[in-house]
Image (cartoon, rainbow, N blue to C red):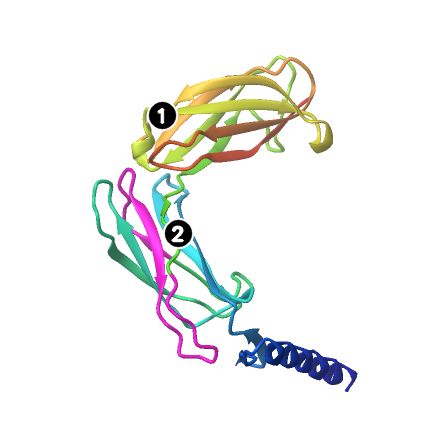
Amino acid sequence: MRRKIVVAVVLCLIAVAALASGAAPALATNGGSWHSAAAEPKLAFEPHVVITNDGSPRFVLSGRLTLGGKGLSGVLIHLQERISGASEFTEVAQATTREWSFFSAKGSFSTAIGSSSTGATYRAVSEALVGPPAVEPVVSAEVLMTPGLEIWKIRGLDKVGHTKLGHSVVAVIRAAPIWLVGEKLKLTLAKGPDLDRRVVQRAVRTIRDGGLCGTCSWKIRPKSRGEYFVGVTLPATADHPRVTENYGWFVVK
């Protein structure tokens, strides 16, 4: 009862403020949740590459549609691509925003396409929602495909990720799509726990053709005992954004 009274008071204050300014209070409901009609829907969108176990790339177009910070489910999203040099976008896939689940937030969507060309840009366009609340079509920002980058394995370690002082290990990195071949990766070796981590080695390697994806390796010989982390960065270019991976962990005993 107390909560209902507070809500009623808040709604009355909104109405009084709107009437004082000469405008009617415009509110819309969605399953019992109130949203201001002035709130604009937002369409977050991130096309990215996932490297599968066998090294092949999976081109994923994913994002989330929200209104007033809350997800909107059941809305059809048109996913469009514009290849480098073209003037128009063409539709390459469709997806529908989902209800909440253990694996995804309400309003999220995701689908995959077969390929992506160098320098292609992408955008997502939502259909209108009759409501309530009624939502006009939303067009996301135009973005480049984010490449996939992973520290695939570190060779020379035992089953628990340890090696002995004086031994060398080899970090193997995979990058996709294959058109990244020839680009440079910046590699770092950091030592210490999170709050006291410092970079002790740096290197640059060129991505080479690994068949289904690009690959490179870095031979490392730590000079002291401790906990180490391998990091790799793919600098941004006109064809893709910057990507960083920092999960290559091992211990020197």
- Whole-percent x, y for residue 55 in the image: 37, 39
* Residue named by callout 1: 183
Q: Check residue 141 in the rendering and tell me which mark sits there, or answer none.
A: 2
Q: The C terminus appears in which quarter of the rendering?
A: top right
Say left or right for 57 vs 44: left
Residue 101 visible in the snapshot:
no
- Whole-percent x, y for residue 14 in the image: 64, 77
Who comes first in sequence, dot 2 or dot 1?
Answer: 2
Q: Amino acid at mark 2?
A: Ala
Q: CA distance from mark 2 to mark 1?
A: 26 Å
Please check the rendered image and state whether residue 158 is part of the magenta-colored stretch, yes or no. no
Check disc 1: other Cα within 10 Å, few if <14, some if 14-19, many if 20+: some
Say left or right for 91 vs 21: left
User: Residue at position x 27%, y 46% from top?
Assistant: 115
Of residue 98 and residue 64, the one placed in the foreground of this image is 64
Numbered disc 2: secondary structure: loop
Q: Check residue 217 in the rendering and tell me which mark sits there, or answer none.
A: none
| Magenta-colored span | 111-138
Numbered disc 1: secondary structure: loop
Q: Main secondary structure of the magenta part?
A: loop
Check disc 2: other Cα within 10 Å, few if <14, some if 14-19, many if 20+: some
Q: The N terminus appears in which quarter of the rendering?
A: bottom right
Contact flag, marks 2 and 1 (Cβ < 8 Å): no
Say left or right for 68 vs 92: right
Q: Is residue 24 above or below residue 195?
A: below
- Whole-percent x, y for residue 75 in the image: 40, 70
